[in-house]
Image (cartoon, rainbow, N blue to C red):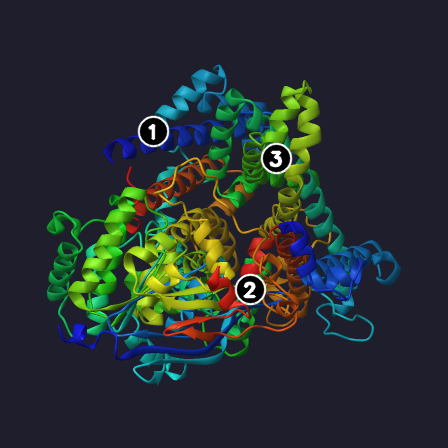
Amino acid sequence: MALYVLRRLVSTIAVMAMVGIFIFLLLRLAPGDPAAIIAGDTATPEMIANIREKLGLNEPLPVQFAHWAHSILSGNLGISIFTGRPVLELISQRLEPTISLAILTMILSVTIGVTFGILAAWRAGGLVDRTLTALATLGFSVPVFVVGFFLIYFFAIRTRWLPVQGYQPIDHGFGPWLVQLILPTMTLALVYVALIARMTRASMLEVLSEDYMRTAAAKGVSSYSMLFHHALKNAGVPILTVIGLSFAYLISGVVITETVFNIPGVGRLVVDAINNRDYPVIQGVLILASGMYVLINLAVDLAYTLIDPRIRY
Amino acid sequence: MSLLSASAEAAPKGRLQLSGLPRLARRHPLVFIGGGLLALLIILALAAPLYASDPLNLYPFKRLQPLSAEMWLGSDNLGRDVFARTAFGARISLLVGLTSAASTVLTGLLVGIIAGYNRRFDSIAMRIMDGLMSIPTILLALALVSLTGAGIGILIVAITITHTPGTARLVRSVVLGVRERPYVEAALCGGARLPKVLWRHILPSTIPALMIQSANLCASAIMTEAGLSFLGVGVPPEIPSWGNMISSSRLYLPIAPWSVFAPGICLAVTVLAVNLLGDGLRDLFDPRATRRR
Amino acid sequence: MQMQKLAGNDVLLDVRDLETHFYGEESVTRALGGISFQVRSGETLGVVGESGCGKSVTALSILRLLPKLTARTVGGEIRFHGRDLLKLSPREMRQIRGNRIAMIFQEPMTSLNPVYTVGHQIAEAVQIHTKASRSDAMAKAREMLRLVRIADPERRVNNYPHEMSGGMRQRAMIAMALACSPELLIADEPTTALDVTIQAQILRLIVDLKEHTGTAVMFITHDLGVVAETCQRVIVMYAGRIAEQASVTDLFARPAHPYTQGLMRSVPDRRHGRQRRLPEIPGIVPSLREPIVGCSFAPRCPFAIGICREKTPTLRDIGPGHAAACFRAEEVMGG
């Protein structure tokens, strides 16, 4: 087990190193002079030279990479060109809304998605199954922002039930925080409900045809217990995998949802940074997002052992 | 009596033998519906100049007009015809969707097949693919597009780069599965050259998986294009794409919802058509999964 | 034991004209074409036949465990203590399963749930059917493991199935099936998937436990040797119907159906030399998707005459407790 965790950590570090190299090269190998891109169209040659000096762009690439990697590993993601503030500080200021949205979305989609998936698998081919499968296909097909505007139009503009956009920090009270997040969460959760329901259904169907399910039935186990105890625990590993992998989509969805609902989170930060060509900020967000993704999938891998006793590392 | 003849006898006789399209529609309705819808959308997109006015025309005195006989889907905040823009927007979505899917399949096939056959390349390529996969698609695409500025070309490149890892992994797994098969080994033992074996035996076996993957890629590409355009970093803002239309009309949602919903619904229908086609193809190539439905 | 006293007298399970169909995409398979038989309290009834003859379908039909979407019992009755199981509500049926009728399956490797401990799975059966507390049920699980002669039950009770060998898993399955002292145990090829040495042990165990508890056993197998060792009465099935029904002694002494004779000839006889090549029954089992005209065995039968290809023979008595579905049973029996 310890050995496995170690091996897994080493491969995680390898992946992160790959991500690091890629993000590093992204800026350096872009067509044109990165310093000129950063300085913008109205920059004087002195300004460009200044930026080049500041970023250490005059040194050979491997040296630049070593400096870059060293500063990132020591927790320094650089300074925002646009605001002059440390990137880490800018990101941490924006973290609360983004994490709130991500966690609420995950809770909502896992509960609804898993339940729907189990219901669909229970009576595979039946009306419930057909309806849910059709809804899942629809859920996959409507882009996040289209869902968002539909929800805003009907639940905020027409009925005035919910706020149109914005965000309330959680220390202003749990109620306002939650009310502000209802529509964004529903918007973002749609795809994940579809994704998780689909995976749950497929995985449950596989398990339901296993011999041990027949054994359980022969013991007199009730349908409820068959589905939620005997089958679900066996179907858990693929479901968990999808939840881990979909985290990357979640981040993409967060960027768009924050724009639709004007939520001041990390997603807005990165979109603004792109409009301002604030590369250190873009870099920082990319590194943190990828790091989160890799860590979550490491956690998912380790969580397998809790579900399935056959998996021993 | 042999097993074969017994089962042939057992097959029901006199069953209506359908052929061609009706047969496809009956046995694989999703392929039929999805494919048909997609074909219709492609025709409508190509024929846009025949039935829609110039999408770039501005009518400053007819801003935010509701639906009317003159402008079927009303006008936007600059007084442009939403119907015409939506019709022409289909061209962008389909162009980006289809080209990105095609280019991703090509790169994925190239990387996947070489990785499936060359160990050293495999270990390096798959590490790179792992790294690329760890960066959320939209963020990576945003970063790529931001380097050069908005444009359809860079958009297709960005979508291709972000979607290649998944496709390469898929091809690689198929190749790894096939290369141990007796007929491949037999061909190699029989003196066939590797490129020929790849072309004759390995490549065809990747086709079913790649057809399903193309549909998925096309849907994802259309969504990514629309998403990036919506964020303002996709197609240049003057080009009428559905993402751009939604982006520029979003502030007028309370008074001119049609200007947001028309492109939004078209976008959803297009992606739905592609997704249905993909689901149908999966059923077609994987009867085991179909039977479980 | 009081059960032992009843042995041979009391009809426990009375199956009449049981018909089960499987529904494919474009065809219907008549897996059971109307079979009738009885199981008496405390007896061991063997059910023999080639794969696909309907042995397992019979077992699953009795417990109503057929796959819901593809199979249905379309006719007949299954009377258990006089009550028709086919008419019970799902809830009433659950109270029978694992409690009064239990079943063990062919594949010990896949028939236990991999994510729960063996003890948990035995205790679950106890808890469903009795008001036992969790700790009492676990104590019962340990007791059952000891009963099926698993060494070190205190430790094994906390094992997961993958930590056990095939033979041990089958023992655990038996422990689970017998935990609620059922009146009928249906054993569906319980030794087929095991090593030969383990097979003998498991057979011995089932026979011993049967004597010990007085449970009636319906023993499904394709192996006539197993039948001879364990059963009192035998049903021979062919193509979804009963071909012959007899006591074990009668069946081996005077097989009255050509199919039974064929089966017996293809059993390796340990007394004769090993050189003899086993005769096999020519041909294959007919497809049950098309209605069969005449006797389903006729195409493979050395005794077949004109009538065999025109009329379907019904099961008829040819001696005390001996019945066969063959027009020429007397001649077949004669030699």
Asked if residue B73 shows in the view, the reply is yes
Distance from the alpha carbon under mark 2 to that under mark 1: 40 Å
Direction from residue C44 to residue A61 in the image, left or right: right
Q: SS class of the residue under badge 2?
A: helix
Distance from the alpha carbon under mark 2 to that under mark 3: 31 Å
Distance from the alpha carbon under mark 3 to that under mark 1: 27 Å
Q: Residue at x 59, y 57 (%)?
A: C300
Q: Residues within 10 Å of mark 3 (few under 14, many from 20)?
A: many
Q: Which residue was labeled with disc 1?
A: A10
Disc 3 residue type (three-letter): Gly
Q: Quadrant of residue A115?
A: bottom left
Q: Which residue was labeled with disc 2?
A: A147
Disc 2 residue type (three-letter): Val
Q: Earlier in the sequence, mark 2 or mark 1?
A: 1
Query: What label sits on residue B108 in the rendered view?
Result: 3
Disc 1 residue type (three-letter): Val
Name the foreground residue: B258 vs A251: A251
Q: Position of residue B175 (x, y in %)?
A: 58, 33
Direction from residue C152 to residue A94 in the image, left or right: right
Q: Residues within 10 Å of mark 1 (few under 14, many from 20)?
A: few
Chain identity of mark 3: B
Q: Position of residue B127 (x, y in %)?
A: 47, 29
